[in-house]
Amino acid sequence: MVGQIFLALILAGIIGAVGGYLGSLMLTKRMALMGGALGHLTLPGVALALLYDFDVSLGAVLFLAFGVAMIWFLERKTQLHLEALTAVVFSGSLAVAFLFLPEEETDIALLGDISRITPATVFSTAAISLGLFWMIKSIYEDLILAGISPDLAQTAGADLKRNNTLYLICIAITVALGVRIVGGLMTAALLAIPACTAKNLSTSLGQYALISTLAGCLACLAGILVYAASDIPPGPAIIIASVILFLVSVFKPFALSFH
Amino acid sequence: MTNDNKVLEVSNLHMSYDGQAIIEGLTFSMAQRDILIVLGPNGAGKTTLLRGLLNLLPYQGSVIWHARKIGYLPPQESLQRQGLPPLQLAEFFHFKTHDTGSIKAMLSDVGLDDSFLSRQFNELSTGQFQRMMIAWSLLDNPDVLILDEPTSGIDIGGEETIYSLLHKFWQKQNLTMLLVTHDLHVVWEYATQVLCLNRQQMCMGKPDEVLTLEQLKQLYGTGIKFYQHRHG
């Protein structure tokens, strides 16, 4: 059990940090809730993974790819907005997931599970996360500049099509990793809350990205420790820890140290 | 004008949006050290033209640049200043270079001191913001600077400051400028070439040769008054 908790702490800390770092960009682009929609898209994949006993992140990423392709196809075939199509596809995914999700596994799919983590899972997650950090860092400044003005970014040399594709890939992979620890319902929180906390506490972009990363990591570590000491599932424990950090940032008892 | 000193050659340029023609058959060129002002009423296609020349929009025809580096300053109202993460000006300038010396020198050239580097991107007044953006556009030493209504939203005093600042940079550096404005006074004061645009090319040449009252009436419709500025 102690070994399992130790593995969970490493895994959740890494995923929390990546989620926080990426979330700081999603808040900039006002796409924080996109993580939630994508989280729902993963659920049929998670259900299949639980049914046939393979890795939930693998199931999640397969269905994410399928869902994103569906949205892309429908956007080309109709005049509907991306947000409307995302709502259609993610609601459908949720319903499909419940068709064949084993009842006893529902909690795991919706709220996360860390009881099946192996050292190999931690190692592969760490390797993927390193890649994600590198990829996010490589597009970070260009995306901030594109948030100010896409024309300004392009004339300054940014390749927006490439950056947006990399950005969506990063979101999809991070959501697929996050589903394991917080479940399919709460991935938006994993991405959005640390960035909100960081925005309250920082006065520069560097601080903002760092605090968002640390807040995501810290919330995940605290959530796993609460899970270990109680019966609270890891997903809700992590998100509540993240909300508490956010509330602390609102009242800023230590704000002076940052200003 | 010889081919050697041409910076931009545009020929038979057509642009459209949703099947509707916005620019029809423009042909013009710009030489080194020109200040070419694009003049025209609202909806004439001025911004579309600039975005086409910068390859930000698709076009038919030919656009050939003979420039090393092109700087662009979009209209101020199209720049997002709110709802961004915290962003100090120093960090914004670091998107282009980490050479603090040249950043400080450029800021000083636009009349902003070093203390602005720690200011937030969304904290500046409209005039300060535009001067800061001019510094940002010129930081990597472009040989062409394209500006779209650089003084929109700025009061008359501030407007004069922006144009005299741009003129100072034009004199100091080997700069060619292409800008869009509604302000005829600016055309008389600073332009070496003027392009009158209302979807089609209505005139092209030196302002005192092509900007006649008849031409302006044709461009803007009746009701325009004509106060030609004479250089001393």
Image (cartoon, rainbow, N blue to C red):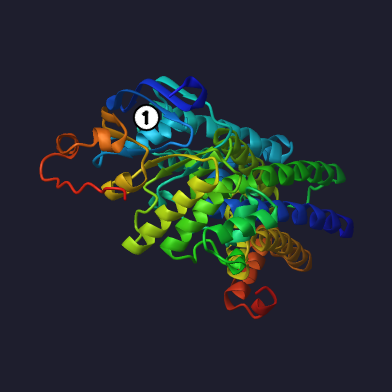
- The residue at 75%/41% (across/down) is A131
- Of A216 and A156, nearer the camera is A156
- Note whether residue A189 is visible: yes
Q: Chain of mark 1?
A: A
Query: Which part of the image, by quadrant, shows the N terminus of chain A?
Result: bottom right
Q: Position of A169 compared to A220: left or right? A: left
Image coords of residue B159 (percent x, y): 36, 58
Quadrant of the image occupied by residue A172: top right
Image coords of residue B42 (percent x, y): 25, 42
Up/down of B228 relative to A243, above or below: above
Quadrant of the image occupied by residue B181: top left
Q: Secondary structure at mark 1?
A: loop
Image coords of residue B135 (percent x, y): 54, 53
How many numbered circles are shown? 1
Query: Is the residue marked by circle 1 packed among few (<14), some (14-19), or many (20+) residues within 10 Å?
Result: few
- Of B57 and B1, nearer the camera is B1
